[in-house]
Image (tube, rainbow, N blue to C red):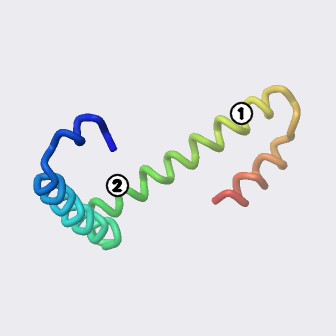
Amino acid sequence: MHPLLTDLPDALLRFLSLRYEKRWAKLEALIADPASDYHCCFASTAESHTLATLRDLLLPKLLSGEIRLDQAENAVEAAL
């Protein structure tokens, strides 16, 4: 447990964790709803992270000649 939280009374910790759980449940519901803006934002962020990871992995290998473009395309298709 975080050192700052050890000084809080148990009742306050339970209250804060309950509020956090309720808010997290609402956020999960919004993310799961395909029509919500949160879902679109979450999906875009996840896709952006995936693409950045692929770029960081493949670009140095392409520039060094370790792999060819057709091999990189196959790797991207497999990842997506």
Please tell me whether residue 1 is drawn above or below residue 66 in the rendered image.
below
Reading the image, the residue beneath label 1 is 59
Relative to 50, is 39 above or below? below
Residue 8, image x, y percentages: 15, 44
Q: Residue at x 22, y 67 (%)?
A: 26
Give how far across and how far down residue 52 sits, in percent: 57, 40
Tell me the CA gap for discs 1 and 2.
26 Å
Q: Secondary structure at mark 1?
A: helix
| Image location (x, y in percent) of residue 15 | 13, 58
Q: What's under tag 2, amino acid-wise? A: Cys
Looking at the image, residue 46 sits to the left or right of residue 78; the answer is left
Circles 1, 2 touching at the beta carbon (< 8 Å): no
User: Which class describes the residues within 10 Å of circle 2: few (<14), some (14-19), or many (20+)?
Assistant: few
Rendered image quadrant of residue 24: bottom left
Q: Quadrant of residue 34?
A: bottom left
Q: Secondary structure at mark 2?
A: helix
User: Looking at the rendering, in which quadrant would you find the C terminus?
Assistant: bottom right
Amino acid type of the residue that numbered disc 1 sits on in the rendered structure: Leu
Residue 9 numbered mark, or none: none
Q: Residue at x 42, y 58 (%)?
A: 43
Query: What residue sits 70% from the left and 38% below the top?
Result: 57
Earlier residue among tags 1 and 2:
2
What residue is shown with label 2? 41
Please tell me which residue lies in front, 4 or 29.
Answer: 4
